[in-house]
Image: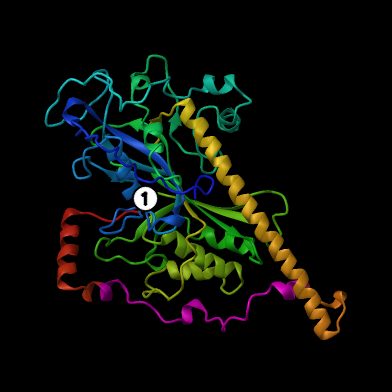
Amino acid sequence: FFFGGMAHNAPPKNDKGKKSKSFDMSRYKQRHIALRMAYLGENYRGLAVQENVPDTVEAMLFNALQKTCLITDTKTCHYSRCGRTDKGVSAWGQVVAVHMRSNLKEGVEFVATEKDAPSASTTADQLPLSDCTVSQNTLSASPTSPIASAATTCSSSTITTASCSSSSSPSSSLSTASGNPNARELDYVQMLNRVLPFDIRVLAWAPVDADFSARFSCAGRVYKYFFLKRDLDIDRMREASQLLVGEHDFRNFCKMDVVHVSNFVREIRDFTIEPCSPHNCDQPTSLWVATISGTAFLYHQIRCMMQILFEVGARLEECDVVKTMLDVEVTKNKPQYPLASEVGLVLWDCQFPSLQWSSTVEAQRLLMAKLLEVYEDRIIKSTMVGAMRAHLQTEMLFSSLHSSGRTAHNVRWKDMEEPPQKRKYVPLMQRDTEPHFEQRVESLSESKKLKRDSNLKKGGEMRR
């Protein structure tokens, strides 16, 4: 779980004899709000809400929004998401937008509602308000605090809750000025985090225009993929990754969805592969991270690209196989190959350069403390598994020496760690292939063809 392995919040029970009061949203004004979110995907079947599937991230978010009376229902809240993540995929910079209840009466842009009545006075369901956003001066005033320590490593022009690496620091800032009306707004971050499951967190919020779409207003998306080096040739992977940079037709690097998508051209702006730590980065157990920046991505595109790079890094394929697969005239049918694991994939940043993200000092302090909890929990478990593995290696070594009569000098540790022999590798260009685009369209059922035609008339395409 995201925070210390704790269980999910159980739904509260109504006190006996007490009648729950219905909430009258018409007494409040509403604003269009963007929320920046983080979540671990291991316990969820993806981000998007699904019928009869309770364990999605959006199902938990909608439940929290309704429990805090920030929305009345999911149909009228004008909800939009930036990047749709699949089962098991995590996020640090996911962004959604929604019409939400406001504590303010004037001074900001409100959205039109059926009945624009004056805001009611503060009630018990509203949280105490504090100085809203964290300014650069506030952070530098307490250099010993965890929040200040994280912020001082960032660029002086951008203060965010995300990582500060130069290749992927979020483009939107978290700042405020004296007299900002948002300082008197509801503490959306604290309200939602108090009722959300522990592995889903709201990081910050930002006021947006009424026509803002988290999907279409996004300037770019950044994904990170974490993996163990093992015996991979990183230089070969880097060389192959640069062939993916630029504008290409990525139909051979995705799960083709011909009902919603007819254009598979996407632009990758940057693709880097770096060690997570400069120490012992050549060891098989060292962690590395691929950072991929682009405008938008196709279904399973990141995991497809990483799988091909892994095969290149394992010296099973040449770097030029990437160029061959990008040429859809040469490779009209996608070769069959598995997806890279979803475990290491993180939607790291959704880029909205003009947004000013807000969060309270207290909310950031709690988030920093909770992140430390989950880090401690995972590092302890990781060390425990490492100790078990080392003990097993020792037992296997002595067992091997005893049964074979060999000495420790002629038994290699690598022999103890090699996985069972896999079947013979078949080169990508010699494998069975999937149907190409035209074949998939032709094989659609009549109902799906009608849906596809409708999508084409609207000019709509599914963007990840």
Residue 184 drawn at (x, y percent): 35, 19
Residue at the farthest top position: 179
> As drawn, is 428 to the left or to the right of 239?
left
| Residue at the image position 36 percent from the left and 59 percent from the top | 298
| Residue at the image position 40 percent from the left and 56 percent from the top | 44
Q: Quadrant of the C terminus?
A: bottom left
Q: Which residue is mark 1?
A: 57
Vertical position of residue 150 compared to residue 201: above or below: above
- Which of the 4 image quarters holds residue 230? bottom right
- Which of the 4 image quarters holds residue 70? top left
- Which of the 4 image quarters holds residue 438? bottom left
Residue at the farthest front position: 17
Q: Residues within 10 Å of mark 1 (few under 14, many from 20)?
A: many
Three-letter amino acid code at the position of disc 1: Val
Residue 17 drawn at (x, y percent): 24, 36
| Residue at the image position 54 percent from the left and 43 percent from the top | 167
| Residue at the image position 32 percent from the left and 77 percent from the top | 435
Vertical position of residue 39 compared to residue 144: above or below: below
Vertical position of residue 132 compared to residue 389: above or below: above
Report the magenta residues as a range: 413-440
Q: Is residue 437 magenta?
A: yes
> As drawn, is 63 to the left or to the right of 130?
left
Residue 201 drawn at (x, y percent): 43, 41
